[in-house]
Image (tube, grey):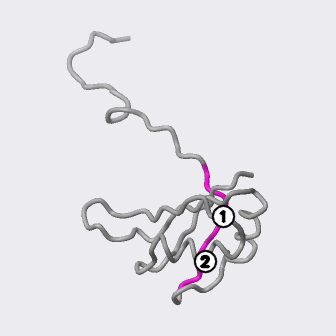
Amino acid sequence: MNNRLYVGNLAYSATNETLIQQFSEFGTVSSAKLVMDRETGRSKGFAFVEMETEADAQAAINALDGKSVDGRAIKVNVARPPEPRTGGFGGGGDRGGYRNNRY
């Protein structure tokens, strides 16, 4: 396990400060990052919170996962590492054209 947590189903009114307040009840919060929409500047409804220790992270998961916060049952679990990004637009594929590949 690691000490970085995914926090989902957050109210759009949530802030980094409210996350720190909620999670600091279970240990030291190293960082809290609410994910924002680039175009609108609004919260996307999820965040990543990093606790100082794995024990703090597990305590936060046990206490907060499924808890109602601002009328929404939040989801708290260990954050998965980001998927490696591939460049470009995917595979090149067949672009058609003439080919002499008769049987």
Residue 6 placement (x, y as % from top left): 58, 62
The quadrant holding residue 78 is bottom right
Tell me which segment is drawn in magenta: 72-80
Q: What element does badge 2 sit on?
A: helix
Q: Nearer the viewer, mark 1 or mark 2?
A: 2
* Residue that appears at 60% across and 86% down: 68
Whether residue 10 is situated above or below residue 34 in the rendered picture:
below
Name which of mark 1 and mark 2 comes first in the sequence.
2
Q: Nearer the viewer, residue 14 or 72?
A: 14
Residue 4 is left or right of residue 57, and the answer is left
Residue 81 placement (x, y as % from top left): 59, 46
Q: Decide whether residue 17 is among the magenta residues.
A: no
Residue 59 placement (x, y as % from top left): 76, 69
Q: Main secondary structure of the magenta part?
A: strand
* Residue that appears at 79% across and 61% down: 55
The residue positioned farthest toward the bottom in the image shown: 71
Q: How far separated are the C-alphas under marks 1 and 2? A: 15 Å
Residue 89 is left or right of residue 77, and the answer is left
Whether residue 95 is situated above or below residue 58 in the rendered picture:
above
Q: What element does badge 1 sit on?
A: strand
Label 2 CA crowd tier, 10 Å (few <14, some 14–19, many 20+): few
Whether residue 25 is situated above or below residue 5 in the rendered picture:
below
What amino acid is found at the position of numbered circle 1 in the picture? Asn
What residue sits right under mark 2 in the picture? 22
The quadrant holding residue 58 is bottom right
Count of marks overlaid on the render: 2
* Residue that appears at 32% across and 33% down: 88
* Residue that appears at 43% across and 62% down: 35
What residue sits right under mark 1 in the picture? 77
What amino acid is found at the position of numbered circle 2 in the picture? Gln
